[in-house]
């Protein structure tokens, strides 16, 4: 986690707005509201936890949106599964995109295009939950403007949940979030020993 | 996490068997195999991560089993969602069961009955993944025999994944597991302030 709010004034404004919302929320405790959740850290389970929340929301008949900010070379199990569920809008950034492209300009364009899709969801109150999978990685590489991302997250509809996953969550995002979990590796035996990722678990 | 292997000899046998399997696995690296995953710690995201892995496995056309060792008073989103998916066998321990019953004998019977269901899955190679949600809590309260649970987990079909969730994973289970993640609370603002659990996120 790192400090990288680029604009101290916008940061202060966000924090003031958050404090106001918090006070209102505490005053009206027991009210339903949208939460901003961040799942970060090096341990296994960040994205899968986000997808579990997606399933949970769908179980309540909610409408959900997913933007995946990292596209591997293979189609993942979660993509295959959730694309066929009713009530899911699923977007994967840049077909065939990986972080191995070594083409910073192309990566930035792909990340920005993905953020426009995310923004569309974050301004549409018909989405009950928006999962921004591996967004933290796009922020880590400065492919997106952090202040813009934070402003858009904060401006989302009050009942909408947003879930952000990925290592290296930036500190200002953690400050803005309602709930933050850090996944710690206790052991990851096979990864350390070069055993391949297992379908259904890692992919 | 605590040390509570009750029978040192069985523990030693298990560890020797595990070492043998590990050596075989390393020798044959890149092979597919079933993994034992443990998701523990106080942070949010343990069960949802298990349910995300379930979704991922279903996306690969796998057959999955779920045993939930804690039954709240309300039907959860995950239960509603996964029960209607093809390829899922879903069992919730003891209808209306909660840990609030204060009836130790009844709780133990319910946990043992749930373990028999789990054992049926863990001895059936047609299940590609078995999720034992909140099993750690049943172990924590000594409602189940830890050695029996560990033996059954270790004896499962070699290609079957098993995922165990819940706080307070016992140390011998962590030793037996292939991958262990501890969820750490960075913040859980609303819970601390008594704001109710939100549908789609907590339930």
Image: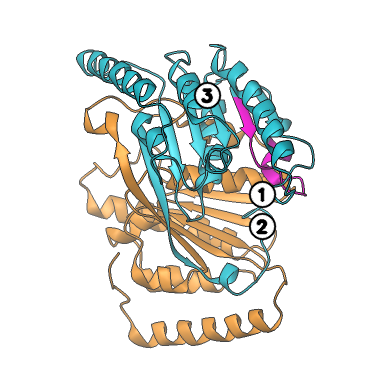
Chain colours: A cyan, B orange
- Local crowd size for mark 2, using a 10 Å CA cut-off: few (<14), some (14–19), many (≥20): many
Dot 2: element: loop
Q: Residue at x 58, y 58 (%)?
A: B121
Q: Is residue A21 left or right of residue A181?
A: left
Does the magenta portion include B103? no
Alpha carbon separation for disc pair 1 and 3 = 22 Å
In this view, the residue in front, A17 or B191, is A17
What residue is disc 1 on?
A: B57
What residue is disc 3 on?
A: A129
Q: Residue at x 64, y 72 (%)?
A: A194
Q: Are marks 2 and 1 in contact (CB under 8 Å)?
A: yes
Task: Tell me where residue A57 appears, x and y as whole percent.
Answer: 52, 27
Q: Can you tell which quarter of the image residue A143 is in?
A: top right
What residue is disc 2 on?
A: B128
Q: Which mark is residue A74?
A: none
Task: Tell me where residue A36 appears, x and y as whole percent.
Answer: 42, 28
Where does the magenta region start and end? A65-81
């Amino acid at each position: 986690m790192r400090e990288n709010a680029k604009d101290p004034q916008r940061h202060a404004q966000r924090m003031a707005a958050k404090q106001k919302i918090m006070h209102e929320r505490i005053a009206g405790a027991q009210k339903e509201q949208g939460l901003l959740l961040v799942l970060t850290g090096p341990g296994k389970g960040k994205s899968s936890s986000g997808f579990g929340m997606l399933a949970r929301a769908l179980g309540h008949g909610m409408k959900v949106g997913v933007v995946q900010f990292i596209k591997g070379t293979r189609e993942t199990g979660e993509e295959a599964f959730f694309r066929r569920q009713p009530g899911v809008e699923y977007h994967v950034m840049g077909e065939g995109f990986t972080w191995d492209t070594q083409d910073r300009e192309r990566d930035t364009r792909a990340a920005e295009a993905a953020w426009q899709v995310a923004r569309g969801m974050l301004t549409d109150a018909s989405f009950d939950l928006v999962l921004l999978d591996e967004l933290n990685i796009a922020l880590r590489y400065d492919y997106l403007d952090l202040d813009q991302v934070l402003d858009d997250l904060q401006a989302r509809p009050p009942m909408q949940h947003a879930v952000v996953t990925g290592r290296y969550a930036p500190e200002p995002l953690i400050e803005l979030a309602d709930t933050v979990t850090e996944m710690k590796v206790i052991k990851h035996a096979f990864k350390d020993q070069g055993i391949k990722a297992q379908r259904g678990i890692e992919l």
